[in-house]
Image (tube, helix red, strand yellow):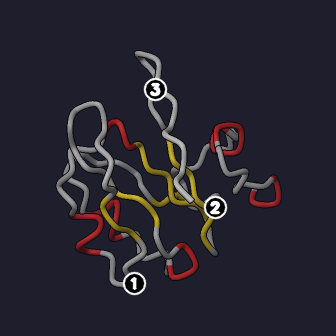
Amino acid sequence: MKSSPKPPIPPGQVRTEITKVPKGVIRILSERCKGCGYCVQFCPKQVLEMSKEYNRMGYHFPVVKNPEECSECKLCYKSCPAGHKIYVCSNSPECIRCLQCQENCPNEAVENQYF
């Protein structure tokens, strides 16, 4: 079955892919990714892979392929030269409990129990 294409993102907004993992969420800002692939290369559990799709800038971006394998090592965002916080745990200092992840998650993968 072929999946339908995602709707275009309005100017000024950023598509955010949020996937629940055992100890938090993986948040990918696909439109801001420059396609270096470091997050994919440095993940010891092969949780991420590069998408076959392109973002607005013409780069492939990471997608989650094995969320259950995430070990919370945070190498994905530590290796990102652009400083994107890919892995965010609801108990981490980076989380400000704004619930934007829950409101914007297209897969309803974030629940209130994490906050």
Image quarter of residue 86: bottom left
10 Å neighbourhood of mark 2: few (<14), some, or many (≥20)? few
Q: Is residue 97 above or below residue 9?
A: below
Task: Tell me, yes or no, whether the two marked residues, 1 and 3, touch with CB atoms within 8 Å.
Answer: no
Pinpoint residue 41: horizontal percent, then vertical percent.
23, 73
Q: Nearer the viewer, residue 58 or 113?
A: 58
Q: Nearer the viewer, mark 3 or mark 2?
A: 3
Per the image, label 3 sits on a secondary structure element best described as: loop
- Which residue, given by chain and number where applicable, does mark 2 sit on? 91
Compare residues 102 and 4 and report the one nearer the observer. 4
Inspect the image, locate mark 2, and give the three-letter code of the amino acid beneath it.
Asn
Q: Quadrant of the N terminus?
A: bottom right
In percent of width and height, residue 82 lies at 23, 46
Q: Residue at x 33, y 70 (%)?
A: 75
Q: CA distance from mark 3 to mark 2?
A: 33 Å
Q: Among all residues in the image, which is located at the extreme front?
A: 1
Q: Secondary structure at mark 1?
A: loop
Q: Of discs 1 and 2, which sits in the foreground?
A: 1
Instruction: Give me the disc on residue 81.
Output: none
Of residues 87 and 48, the one nearer the viewer is 48
Residue for badge 3: 8
